[in-house]
Amino acid sequence: MSVWNYVVTAHKPTSVSHSCVGNFTSPNQLNLIIAKCTRIEIHLLTPQGLQPMLDVPIYGRIATIELFRPHWDADKSELLTRAMGDVSDRIGRPTDNGQIGIIDPDCRLIGLHLYDGLFKVIPFDNKGQLKEAFNIRLEELQVLDIKFLHGCVKPTIVVLYQDNKDARHVKTYEVALKEKDFVEGPWSQNNLDNGAGLLIPVPAPLGGVIIIGEETIVYCNANATFKAIPIKQSIIRAYGRVDPDGSRYLLGDNTGTLHLLVLTHERERVTGLKVEYLGETSIASSISYLDNGVVYVGSRFGDSQLVKLNLQADASGSFVEVLERYVNLGPIVDFCVVDLDRQGQGQVVTCSGACKDGSIRASVELQGIKGLWSLKSSFNDPYDMYLVVSFISETRFLAMNMEDELEETEIEGFDAQTQTLFCQNAINDLLIQVTANSVRLVSCTSRELVDQWNAPAGFSVNVASANASQVLLATGGGHLVYLEIRDAKLVEVKHAQLEHEISCLDLNPVGDNPQYSSLAAVGMWTDISVRIFSLPDLELVRKETLGGEIVPRLAIAKEGELSIGTIDDIQKLHIRTIPLNEQARRICHQAQSRTLAFCSFKYNQTTYVLPEENEPTKGRILVFAVEDGRLQLIVEKETKGAVYSLNAFNGKLLAAINQKIQLYKWMLREDGSHELQSECGHHGHILALYTQTRGDFIVVGDLMKSISLLVYKHEESAIEERARDYNANWMTAVEMLDDEIYIGAENNYNLFTVRKNSDAPATDDERARLEVVGEYHLGEFVNRFRHGSLVMRLPDSEMGQIPTVIFGTINGVIGIIASLPHDQYVFLEKLQSTLVKFIKGVGNLSHEAMAVIP
């Protein structure tokens, strides 16, 4: 691999951090807006469900999102930026609990809490334009949440904070815009629930705020109203308002339980609180009530869901009905790349999700898809059962299983070794498959071939269309062939030759008979016309010339070469889920036995913590054998610390244990049993979290001390440090691209590559230094790198020789890093620079500014 690396996303982020509901695209359209780390999705609520409208990347990480109607270009379906600016300060300590952004309910100002001890105010003028921002000193340093109160004459915030004795309180402040300072607010409340962590402002006329704790829920307002209710211990992190007056709220806790909080009131006075159990959902990170009992539950730890709240409980006592699931791969804690078919087609198997939403996900790139068709298991079935996926040189079949997931299957009567041009359910419970060489009729029940029509010698089918009883084909040279299905047989009825090549066909029935069409539409090349023919005689009824260009293309000129093509959309992955109901932490693949092993953990009631331990002082390495499909523990080795990483290394076992790298030998005892025996080790790390090996070299990713390179010396049976990166990076993943170049990811969402200075003199200090040769701000927290590819590698293909590394992130992103030749890298860099001049980011954010490490 080279120092010239290309980073691309194969699977977009799926982890939902924020969501809100409002009339964004039109005053009459209700929209759901979803934030997924570096992307914003806008959906339209329709009677048929959620309809995707827009999915746009953001050149940055979304820290907060609040309901505010931006300008919308209905003609271009684009977001228009109203205002943007850099609100960072040169000095200040970033908040430990994340950035907070809030908008005054009366749109008088925007409030930001970005640094400890400071509250930034951005006022609006009378015309709704933003004025100059200023900071106000905030006494409370450990702020947990801030919200604006409703129905206040002056802008008023309520602050939930923790003091130096770990007690939690709330205090209110009025924002004096002229004085640019705080004024003591109308009320405060001390000594709340020690687990209080969320504020919910209540709209007027009730007003006030709801304080969500781990064991109590409290309502307070300026009229000295104080109402509290105990709850079962839980951590509530998401809420959604149901009614405009704020009398009902949906609450989601850390176990995935959904509750309804009701504020009972008489006119404008709250008289009590009531909490009702509704049911189970994914662990919610955001809750948005849409309409008519339909709720969107966004999740970071599992699949997001669209649920319906029913008036009556089901047999299990739940009022929640799941209408739709939206796949979320995040957080990807670990993954492996496997080639189960040994054809160079990689599959990524991930440890995804957390807690009860933990799962194993198998993701495969469906590259080069030429066609998709859904088929029913019988002609009169109301639902589709099969999905036919056509590629350039093959056809695959997917079927719905009992868990409503797609899995690969076979339809014996179909030709799977060639590209499918058309598929259709037909009368008499038959299936139609059209390929370049034939038309096949297959039984729905037996899946066996019933009848077949073959293309004439020297001709092949280029375009096809069909309905329940008719088939229309174009076989090249302007030839048009019409077939009918009669008594489960294919009968050639008519043949005609046209003066130009045929570009497209349509045989959808027009009229009262849904199974038979008396007209056929034929699109032509050359004269760019559409022609209507009568059936079954193929007589021309009407010809309409369209004119104009055919297809827009992209032309790229290089030295001695002109390339004409298009820029494809981001490829999507087909994902299969294996629920675990607990969190998988590590996974590995054994190619010889074609098996996967994974480790998971779940909490139990016997867990205990040693308070005097800052770091674990004990750990274990367990060796298992697989006998008759069961795991058998054969060796257990106790360690003096936590085991963070394990690697096979020259027939031995390399372990990262706290601050030490330890090498173990597999030894045979006199009684015939085996043991792990320590051979050598290396100290000098803060915490050695990640290790990768190549030959005799070891790369270590440290908690704070970036990347170091170690070498194992066989003769001396010792591990020594060869070089290190002297920058302070808090590592999250490392990988060896080749013998000389290593890649790392750190906690500020950056990627960087370092190179070993092999050519430096032996006495030169530069030889002991890893040189940073590449940096890129990804904006994603990477947990793992793996060598491999998602696409089929063809030995004769130029692209098949490009080495690639796959990475997975906490937001469900699967990305690719490809090492390119220098000339290709320079060309793509110039193309990128040209594209960013014409493609403007949402919010006028710069792609160049995002990609550069801050």
Image (cartoon, helix red, strand yellow):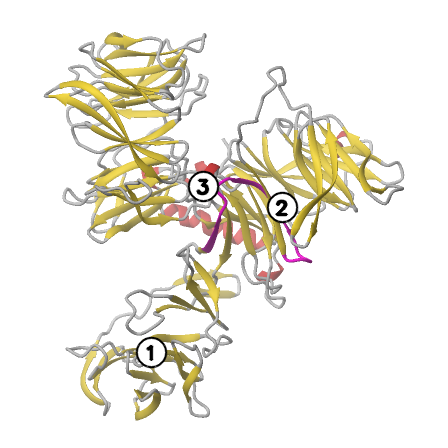
Q: Which of marks 2 and 1 is in front?
A: 1
Residue for badge 2: 3
When the figure is inspected, residue 216 is found, relative to residue 730, above or below; the finding is above
Residue annotated with mark 3: 357
Q: Residue 226 placed where, x, y %?
A: 23, 13
The answer to whether the residues at label 2 and label 3 have Cβ atoms under 8 Å apart is no
Q: Is 502 left or right of 712, judged from the image as shown?
A: left
Q: Classify mark 2: residues with Cα within 10 Å, few (<14), some (14-19) or many (20+).
A: many
Determine the main secondary structure of the stretch shown in magenta: strand
Quick one: SS at disc 2?
Answer: loop
In the rendered image, the vertical position of residue 201 relative to residue 512, given as above or below = above
Q: Mark 3 is on which residue type? A: Asp
Q: From where the camera sits, is residue 842 visible? A: yes
- Lateral position of residue 526 relative to residue 194, left or right: left
Q: Which residue position holds label 1?
A: 429
User: In the image as oriented, which residue stretches furthest toward the left?
Assistant: 267
> Residue 463's image quarter?
bottom left
What secondary structure is found at the residue carrying circle 3? Answer: helix
Q: Which of marks 2 and 1 is nearer the N terminus?
A: 2
Q: In the rendered image of this protein, does residue 257 appear above or below residue 151?
A: below
| Image point (17%, 16%), residue name | 152
The answer to whether residue 766 is visible is no
